[in-house]
Amino acid sequence: MRTIKDETVTKFLRNLQSEGKSPISIKNYKSDIFHFLGWAYLKIKSFGSVAESVMEIVPFVNNNFFVGYKNYMIENNTKTKTINRRLSSLRNFSGFLHSEGFIDQNFMQGIQNVGIGIVSKVQKKTQDIVEAFRESLTEDKKVSANTIKNYTADARSFLAWIDKKGDLPNAY
């Protein structure tokens, strides 16, 4: 996997340092932004385009793009605190890009944090179902550990997809 380097992010991190943010906070900002950029680059690639820098993803970015990222984290059972920290980092980054004139509007404006109870209920239901599925696979001694890992990952993704689609609200 390639290392992501971007002068815009570097400038943002230097700005945080000049504001007196702690090294740990800056490390978290950097991690959160690069996590988002990794997702954004892959998302843009799925559109049939290529982006190599923050400035190249800007034309694709809007409020719905960030909502998509938020939903991606929820669907992948990212911890609520981590989701909310990443969203906070992106709010700051988007505000910085807007204040520096890199973007016309702050696209993170209005993107709310995830409520703790909402994600926890979805995660709990998914964990319960996946664990029951894992146990059923384990009972069959012919299934390898790697197969169990792959099947449970697929089941978790499928349940997240069902929850997102809303087609089967009482399915689990």
Image (tube, rainbow, N blue to C red):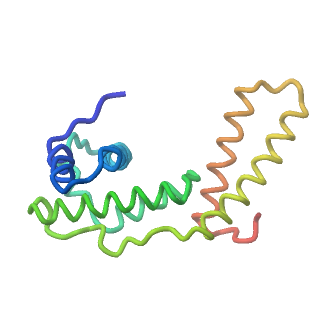
In the image, what residue occupies the spot 14% across and 47% down?
11
Exactly how many numbered labels are in the figure?
0
Residue pictured at 57% horizontal, 64% vertical: 164
Q: Residue 99 in the image: x percent, y percent? A: 12, 65
Q: Position of residue 49 (x, y in %)?
A: 26, 45
Name the outermost residue toward the bottom: 110
The residue furthest left is 101
Quarter of the picture containing the C terminus is bottom right
Residue nearest the observer in this picture, 167 or 80: 80
Q: How far from the left and from the top, in percent, is residue 19?
A: 18, 57
- Residue drawn at x 37%, y 71% is 111
Direction from residue 31 to residue 84 in the image, left or right: right
Residue at (75, 48) in percent of width and height: 130
Q: Is residue 45 visible?
A: no
Report x, y in % for residue 143.
Answer: 81, 27
Residue 49 left/right relative to 96 = right
